[in-house]
Amino acid sequence: MSEQKDTLLEFPCEFSVKAMGLSSHPDFEALVVEIVSVHVPDLAQDASRSRSSKNGKYLSVTVTFQATSKAQLDAIYYDLTGHQDVVMSL
């Protein structure tokens, strides 16, 4: 009998998380990077990129890093979605 996996990902792997928030936030990109860096201590300086929505109301921030486990990813998503300034995370 084969062991069932919790995820289709094979760790370690490169992974990107995206968080969206209001662009009126003074430094939303730094906030997202700070949340992710709690779980990824060796996060590269250039790991994030941001983009405004078409109408400029929202800002999406993508952070790419080397993921080490499903538990790490779960913790990152939990912290991002639990923050009051994060509207959505993918």
Image (tube, rainbow, N blue to C red):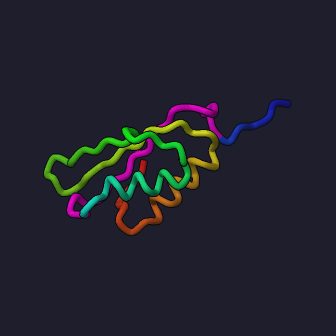
Percent position of residue 29, x then y:
32, 53
Horizontal placement of 26 versus 73: left or right?
Answer: left
Horizontal placement of 54 versus 42: left or right?
Answer: left
Q: How many marks?
A: 0
Q: Residue at x 64, y 49 (%)?
A: 71
The quarter holding residue 62 reads top left
Q: Which residue is at the far left?
A: 55
Q: Residue at x 30, y 49 (%)?
A: 60
Q: Which residue is at the far right?
A: 1
Percent position of residue 55, x then y:
13, 51
| Residue 86 drawn above or below residue 11 | below
The quarter holding residue 22 reads bottom left
Q: Residue at x 53, y 36 (%)?
A: 66
Q: Is residue 8 magenta?
A: yes
Q: Residue at x 35, y 60 (%)?
A: 87
Q: Which residue is at the far bottom?
A: 84
Percent position of residue 50, x then y:
28, 45
Horizontal placement of 54 versus 28: left or right?
Answer: left
| Residue 39 drawn above or below residue 83 | above
Percent position of residue 80, x then y:
45, 58
60 and 25: which one is in front? 25
Horizontal placement of 67 versus 34: left or right?
Answer: right
| Residue 38 drawn above or below residue 11 | below
Quarter holding the N terminus is top right
- Magenta-highlighted residues: 7-25
